[in-house]
Amino acid sequence: MTLQKPTLFEQIREEDRASAAAGGLVTSRVLRIVIIVAATLSLMAFLPGRLGDTQRTAFDRSRIGTSWTEESVIADYPFPVERSADSLARNREIAQRTTPATVRRKIGAVALSNAILQAEVERAPEPAKAVLSVRGKNALRDVYQTEIVDRDNAQLPGDVVVELLPSAEERIIPMTTIRDSVDVALAFESMFSDLSEDLRQNVTRILRAALVPTLRLDDRAWTIARTEAAQNVAITAEIVQRGDVIVRKGQRVDGTILERLAAYRYGEYLRSTSQFSFLVVIGAFGHALFLISMVALYLYYVRRSSFQRNGQLASLLSMPVLSAGFGWVTIALPTALPLEYVIIVPGLAMLTSILYDVRTAIVVTLACSLSVAAARGNDHVIAVVLIAGGAMAAYSATNLHARTQIFTSILSILIGLVVVTLSIELERDTPALALILKLGASAANAVISPLLAFAVILVMERTLNLATDLRLEEFDDINHPLLKKLNERAPGTYQHTMAVVRLSESAAAAIGANALLARVGALYHDIGKLEKSEYFIENQIDIDNKHDRLSPKKSAAIIRQHVQDGIELAREYKLPDRIWKFVPMHHGTVLIRHFYAKAIDEAFEKEVLIDEQDFRYPGPKPDSKETAVVMLADAVEALSRLLDTSQRDQIERAVHQIILDRTSDGQLSNTPLTLNDLDVIKESFIKSLLGSSHQRVRYKDTRETPELPQP
């Protein structure tokens, strides 16, 4: 006897069993533990306490504007409060800018000026010579009553200049006693205002040419003086004495209090005998483990299938790790820009919502936002902002039917980030410039996150044959080649499929499941009947039932075969896994009762044993709400053809019995359906069946109308 070749689906199941037996990577429990531990250690690497070093700057700027809720802090010892880097740089810049100019005296400047004037007088025309001989010399003598500098006074800061004497001493000269060339020119114009225009211009030109400044600016010495002034700026803002109150309970924290708190903590760090604490390392590990556990425990209790698939588990746990890394970078980079507001937590939330569901996206958003806050030294403000933006992103990405909805996501994220940021920063009385920068960064995040999320989704769809809700629209088409063949070769199955689509879509929407996925899955659930359509009752039009000439076991095998054929067709036409899994799951491991009952009757007569597994579908059982809905809709639609669908009580009993049979047979045990969901599904089916059986008015034909008498 020849061995029967295993079906494609049986081969797939055998491969899965072999993989599980060998500790395959997909579902290996050991690898799952390794992933969780690795994610925890990776996240811990970005936390402040990762090296056991006590936190020197535990009081970050996120506390400014908040109330101090802890007990009052009183100094146990005197300590200096150093200026912040920004404050120190600002004060040094002020010191350089206000350093008085350094000048040196030009020896013999007055005598040289007189000599130049004498030479100019001899060459001057007669009218000017007469004026310059007397009045010109007097004017020059008058301007030399004050010091004359060779630079514009506007370039010299402060109220004084410093003269360097030959003895290396310094002399302070007030700016009120110093003139520049512009001041002297104006003085000459005033002295000779009584002269004619041409003569006055000629005289003042000669006097300005003869002018020699008494002071010249020493640029090199001034540069040295400015450098020394910057270096002499004290790095200490103040000295806090023992017993001074640093901050009182309930007091509003400002920049000065924050600097005192940070300096006090740093002083404690320097005074401690040990600057490494293993307890700090344990605390950092526990902090990271808590954040990773938020996602892991949610998956374990709510999305068990994702938890058991190591690829999905690793991808979801990598998101808080990635967020923590971004948070660490915003602290490590030496910039005053609010980079933390550009961290793409909303983009990660959108990805999770599209690939999984909105509840998972919300949990991931919480973990990612808290990871950013943890990496930044428990910055709760950015956590609140990112939670708001991530939540809006997650909800905006549900039920995506077109890529143009990216604009809805951008607007939603923008509202979430900007409203929360504005509220918090106004409460904290943030300066206008800092507020504008944060709002601008939030707006940039609202644009970057959706663009990045949609780009990643597009790549995953094409490279991994992934069917997101966006791509499901491509398969929701009755003109798809598979469905056109089904309509041509198996018209009865096609009509059955359309009825199942209607039932599935309504029921899925009623329980809050993915109605689009249920609809598309229902469209392709029976494509396997294309190969031997004449063996299925709905296609036996004007032909005999071929099963009448077959044994029950052979008939059951042919019926089971349509699952294998459907999988082969789905792979041939490159249907994504998310769609083709409806082919085997819409039957699960249900017993083919009709042929099983016939086999029992024959076995009783012939006194032979039968194997129930020969009369069960190969499975697997449904693993989601959508696949379960299609399973129930398929059975309900088939049974409804045997009932009077205008009678609610008959429909109600039939639907109830089908749901009870599938539940008692364990077909729904791998799905997240609740008893309430089943009640809602039942009511949806009943309404749909009643709606499809409405009566129409029988219109009277004109040929049935009695002939009217002629006038």
Image (cartoon, rainbow, N blue to C red):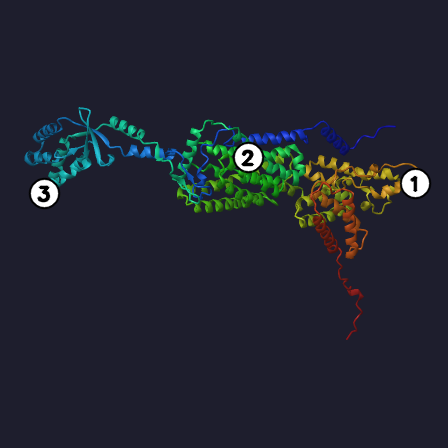
Q: Quadrant of residue 100?
A: top left
Eye-nearest disc, 1 or 3: 1
Nearer to me, 612 or 369? 369
Residues at circles 1 and 2 in contact by the CB criterion of under 8 Å: no
Q: Secondary structure at mark 3?
A: loop
Q: Secondary structure at mark 1?
A: helix
Above or below — where is 23 with respect to 632? Answer: above
Nearer to me, 660 or 143? 660
Residue 635 lies, in percent from the top left, at: 77, 46
Q: Secondary structure at mark 2?
A: helix
Residue 345 lies, in percent from the top left, at: 54, 39
Above or below — where is 214 with respect to 477? Answer: above
**For mark 1, what is the residue?**
604
Q: Left or right of 632: which side holds 431?
A: left
Residue 589 lies, in percent from the top left, at: 78, 39
Q: Left or right of 144: which side holds 690?
A: right
